[in-house]
Amino acid sequence: MFRKVAIAIVAVVVIAFGALWAAVTYFLDSATIAEQLKKEVTTRFNRTLVFQGDLKTNFFPKVQIVLPATSLSFEGSDKPQFTLQGAQIGVAVMPLLKGDVQFDDVVIDGLKGQINAARILQKAQQSPKAQTAAGSSVETKADNSGSSFIKNLEVASVEIKNAGLTVYGLQDKKIYAVDSLNLSTGKVGLSGTTPLKFSTNFSEKTQRLSGQLSLDSTITYDVRTISVSLAKPSLAVSIQQNGETTSAELKADQLQYVNQDVSAKVLDLTANVAGMSVKAQVAAAQTQGMQSWGIDGLKLDATDNKGLKANLTGSFKGELKNLTLQSQALKGEVQTVLAQSTLSVPFEGTVSVQPGEKANLNLKGTLDKSPWQANVQVSGFTVPTINGNFALETFVVDKWIASEAAPSKKTALNSLQLISDAYAAPSQSLDVLNKANGRFGIQVNSVRYQGLNVSGVDTTITLSKGVLTLGNVKASTCSGAITGSAQVNASEKWSVNMNVKGLSMQELLKGLGSQVDFAGKANATVKLNGLGLEKTALLKSANGNMSLSINDAVLKGLSLEKVATAVKQKKVTGLVMHPEDQTRFSVLSATATVGNGILNARSIQGRASVAEVNGQVQVGMIDSSLYGEVSAKLATSVDGRRVTVPIKLGGTIQAPTYGINLEAVIKDQLHNAIEKAVTENPKLKEGQKRLIEGLGKLFNR
């Protein structure tokens, strides 16, 4: 019915226009017509119409009008609102008598204008006719017989050149514009086939957004059945904003709209978005009765400028009314480069979307040839709530961490330059944490780092109000257990609370590649917080406390018992240590603070059968440097005095050095000798006494 009404209206307008224009042009010349048009526009619309040239008209054999450069002003002003470089339109007279409407070439050149959309909408709402129409519920029926007069309708061609339009007053004062708009067609009628070319530039000025759009195709259409088919269409769009360009191009063998259904065959899409290149192919896509939809043979490939690659294949179907989706034969793979190696993650499974903004993902695959499985439930798409779990068999961490060159220099034994000015990368914002909520379980059977194996990793990730929490962390390694929690927010502020029980120090140090031969069962607590997740920023900003106690500790390579024996026997050769030498501690504990890139073990206390150990150690967390002094107070006495053996630590965590601090021993022995000389010889002259006291001050005693 709508089609017939439209055709009837076109017929009436064309006939009326033709008859009126024939009468006017028969009795009036072009100059008179132009003047009458100007007066009519001024009187009826309070606008100024200007022809910058001669208006040309023709009556027979076709009714034709040719406009010169023309302008139409704003209402109540002489400032042009619309301008036109030129236009022409004409319709044959004789064919009208038999219902055959034949337009000549329609050409519109350089039409440009400005529209205040807010003002137009305001006037439309205030119009009495609009209010009457809005309040009326009377249904009208069109007389179908009125369309029978039009037997045929043809336009030789349509050409719009260099047009432009600016629309403002919409969506909070945004300014939309199109320019350089060009459109050309071949012959156009009620049905047929014609080539179509369209291109334009567009922009939104308040957001500094601009772009280009073009379409090239051959169209087969039928106005009577409202159907259209595009053969070999090529659609391209490019958008520029804030120095970034996003572009896309769509090509197809056929796009079709028939009987209110849309279908497509052999679609090819290429796009470049935010440094990522995307290519997609679809064998076929269609809707059925505008109730359901389907996509068959989807192939998707995506790459970015950082080495990330992804591909996906599958088919999809769903319902239009309820907006549902169900995947079929879904497979894919994600690849990325880590530590100059390619990490490949193939996967397969199903994805579904249900009414009410709900989605389910059930995927499985391999990660570095180790099987994994993920089940995800999503509720809400604006700020989604994500629940589910992820399970992985094995993950080898150090394989994907870039190796660092071994340090070529060792830290001096008597000094350590604090890394207070070490560069800490500025923290970034994890805005993604504000865009979702949820709860996700993670289980990894085995995590390997160097020679260290962490098994039974289990935690629950909770995301709420921009805060990501790893709760109930559980894992086992080195014959011990690890429990705790961690948290990070959108500002990259993080905190870690961990407890370790029964950890084998020998297994731990061996697994980390340390040369220290140290055994014992360790219990530890760690409470740290900081800002930034980049490695240097994390180590630089880390702040907090740590405590450690080791039971049944055994340190090989140093025997305090051997030292005690050598001191007692006054044999220097007894101070030479061998790899098989060892010291057993019944108790060994330490407390430390972390800050400014330094782990400072302020209090180290130990007790062995032949000595008591006290000291402090500093570790540079950024460069792994090690510096410290530990004193062993021997139970053995020499000349009635308990001997204290100072031990100097240095090197790095990976390759520490330690040994007897001979400098301190010499100072201590000289101090004792001076003190004994002064005590046992009270009759020494004053000058001699002062000399001996001066020697004591020289050795800082």
Image: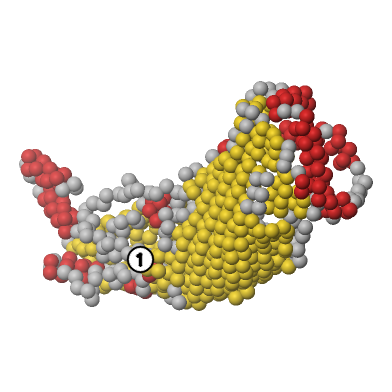
Residue at 50% across, 43% down: 242
What coloring was used for the rendering? secondary structure
Q: Is residue 389 left or right of residue 580?
A: right
Residue at 60% across, 48% down: 184
Q: Depth check: 643 or 514 in front?
A: 514
Name the spot of residue 686 as percent of width and height, x first: 9, 39
Q: Is residue 604 left or right of residue 345?
A: left
Q: Quadrant of residue 17?
A: top right
Residue reaching furthest to the right: 138
248 to 294, vertically: above or below: above
Name the spot of residue 600 as percent of width and height, x first: 35, 54
Name the spot of residue 195 as percent of width and height, x first: 61, 55
Q: Depth check: 605 or 92 in front?
A: 92
Q: Quadrant of the N terminus?
A: bottom right
The crowd level at tag 1 (other Cα within 10 Å; few <14, some 14-19, many 20+) is few
Label 1: element kind: loop
Q: Is residue 91 visible?
A: yes
Residue at 39% across, 49% down: 425
Residue at 64% across, 49% down: 157
Q: Is residue 413 left or right of residue 553?
A: left
Q: Is residue 195 left or right of residue 632?
A: right
63 to 619, vertically: above or below: above
Name the spot of residue 602 as percent of width and height, x first: 35, 54
Mark 1 highlights which residue? 340
